[in-house]
Amino acid sequence: MVDNWGFIAVLTLVAFTVPLIGLALSWLLRPHRPGPIKQTTYECGLETIGDSWVQFKVQYYLYALIFVLFDVETVFLYPWAVAFLGLPLFALVEMVIFLGILAIGLIYAWRKGALEWV
Amino acid sequence: MNPEMAFFYAVALLMIATAFGMVLARDMVHGVLFMVGNFVLTAVLYLLLNAPFIAAVQLIVYAGAIMVLFLFVVMLLGAQDLSLSEPAGGRRIIGVAAVLILGSLLTFVVKEGLPAGTAAGLAEERLPTLAAFGREGVEDPQSGAAFGSPQMVGEALYREPYHIVPFELVSLLLLVAMMGAVVIASFGKGGVAAAGPEQRPGEDSA
Amino acid sequence: MPHIPSILTHFSPELILVVGMLLVLTYDLWVRGREGLQANLAIITTVLALVATLVLWVTMPGSHPVFEACGPGAKAGTCRPGAFISDDFTHFFRVLGLLGTLLVLISGQTYMRGRTAFKGEFYALVLSAVLAMNLMAGANDLIVIALAIEFLSITSYILTAFLRHDGLSIEGGLKYFLYGSITSAAMLFGMSYLLGIGGSTSVPALAAIARNPELAQVQGYANIMLPALALVLAGIAFKIALVPFHQWSPDAYQAAPTPVTAFLSVGPKAAGFAVLIRLFVGSFSSLSASWLGTMGLLCLLSMVVGNVAALTQGNVKRMMAYSSIAQAGYMLLGVVSLGGKTLMGLDSVGAVLFFILTYVFTNLGAFAVIIAVEQATGSAELGAYRGLMRRSPLLAVSLVVFFLSLVGVPPLAGFVAKFAVFGAAVTGGQVPLAVVGVLTGVVSVVYYFGVVREMFFGASEEGQPGPIRVGMGTTFVVLVALLMTLVVGLWPEPFITLANNVAHSIAPALQAAGGH
């Protein structure tokens, strides 16, 4: 048990170190010539207008909600998948029904235009 | 102090720091981001307690779903308008009082401990009993899955047909929530909203 | 798979509702050219589920646990008793819920037609709500109870706020939601303690622990069951709208589309009582000494606050909200009169069931009239009822009959029901509550009469409005409700026998103890 977490700890450490090494190296190697242009926000070569923290449209809430729906779905899929080999056949049927109902929900939201970008 | 304790204290200190950051942030979006940090650290705490499934749920549901909803609400209402809102005033006193009461209760419980012979959840030897939780009658987990692991949760949930109703009901509940969002939250033109403002009574044939 | 036949038979009404609900929701995806028939599809689904229930009730009486946990690894005799139980008690509440919904669908069809474009969603939500009520009626596990209540709550919030272009509707839905989420949290908190002590969510397992604390997984904490049950009671009391968990109900009742109000006043209340009786009377009766006092208080407050607050309401939907709070108080009076015996050997639980039966028909009848009046006048204010006697004698006279039955005037159904409940209260040792019940019943005459006076004696200033055309659906519902109110009042014996049989199926232990 502890060994497994040890692996994860080492992996986390490596994951943090690799980009840090990259950044440190480029900081050491790059030429140092600051200028006002370099301080501006990069947005596809265009000047940004206004603040990026603007009020969102209420429709976006639907995206958030649909995301939450499928997010919660993974909570149920995860233990099911891990235990799958030890489970009887009806567990598969159960999950198919579960996903089927959510798929109907997705089709419904789609057809109602809730997923349209406005 | 063994390394595990040292790790715990590091996580605990960071959690307290992020909690303060969340409360004290002058900008709502920063507050929400501190909260994400707090949620992730809570998941680490669950891992330390040997509850990997709860840790995963904490990450997926709280740091994922709940957080997205928080951010959306903040952005919907406009982050600027929410920041620096009216002074807390009397609510601050109530808040401090609530914190003090909860803090003293927790201190009391931790200092006194649970009455002798009853600290079931804490005692090591009770763990096998707790592992049987939710699956009495099943002799012995054939898989030998550890208590609190996703595998054990999966077996408890799906091996018997016992939990079919609540399980499928969850998907229906999510479907109903989606209907509610479409009916109540869709405004404006296009798509959903084309169904928008109401028809005249008796306009359609039945 | 030995479970599948059992699920397909004893769970068939619920399966029919799920399939019907999905079909209604996706109706406009697979039907071309025949728009707007979602209401008919919903009615057909309800009728099919009703027929399935009746067939089950008649052909397979007795208790049938569904979704048992007896896997290959299980030791003999250690099966968990099933997350859902299909017994006479479940059938009774299934039939009431489905019949009530059917009447609401029929009387509310034309009302909803002009007011929303989301037809599929509306009828799918109504079917979801019935499904949740059925599940509450047969739930035998805390998780099923919690999820079914939550499912019913969420559908109710959406239905209340359904007319989203109406600010009032949204406001009512939001208030309902805020109260509801807090009581749900309290209820789940209480359930988490029950699970922690018992190590199981199964209601029979927990009931066994309540009888014998030695069985608990965690020793020495059996007393925590009482506050935990109190929290669960709060969650149920919120669904039933018992004082002091009622504040949402006047706002939600007034704001919701009127067919939804009719539904809310009947469905969640009946389902809430199903859970309450199965949980407290059926399973935790060994702790009754502890919960009787709390419930008695809820009962007293509901009868008094409901009837007094109804006096000053100028909106009939709001008035009916308080009136139904008071009626719920009378139902609870029967629950707290454990061991009481009344009419024809009816015991206290039977009296509650009989009361709920009469209440469903009477209240839905009254609401059918309210819907019709609102369609004709566009308002549910008291003034809208002015001169109703001239405009539609059928509606006016029926409403008077329904109100008289709610007051409890012989020979109507409400009289027999009240008589049964008060009788149970007197013999069950709740005499003070029975006295309060009779007195508040007298008070209720005043507010019902306020509406009657407008209908018969109110002179309208702006000339004589023409007669109201009453639709087929409304006429049908009003006549059915009238018929039931009269038949149950004049010939109550078969219904009393029915209620008594159903009560015996839920609390056989009570029958043995009920003699003293």
Image: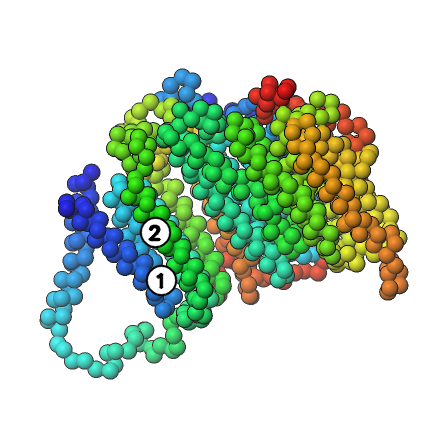
Left or right of C78? Residue C365 is right
Q: Where is residue B60 in the image (x, y as percent from the top left)?
A: 35, 49
- For image coordinates 37% across by 41% down, the residue present is A77
> Mark 1 or mark 2, which is nearer the start of the sequence?
1
- The disc placed on residue B23 is 1
User: Does residue C26 appear in this view?
Assistant: no
Q: In which quarter of the image is the C terminus of chain C?
A: top right
Left or right of A98? Residue C171 is right
The correct choice, above or below, for C508 with respect to C154 in the image is above
Q: Position of residue C325 (x, y in %)?
A: 66, 45
Q: Do the residues labelled 2 and 1 touch (CB within 8 Å)?
A: no
Q: Which chain carries label 2?
A: B
The correct choice, above or below, for A103 with respect to C410 in the image is below
- For image coordinates 56% across by 38% down, the residue present is C294
Q: Mark 2 points at which residue?
A: B103
The correct choice, above or below, for B96 with respect to C509 in the image is below
Please name the amino acid that badge 1 sits on. Answer: Val
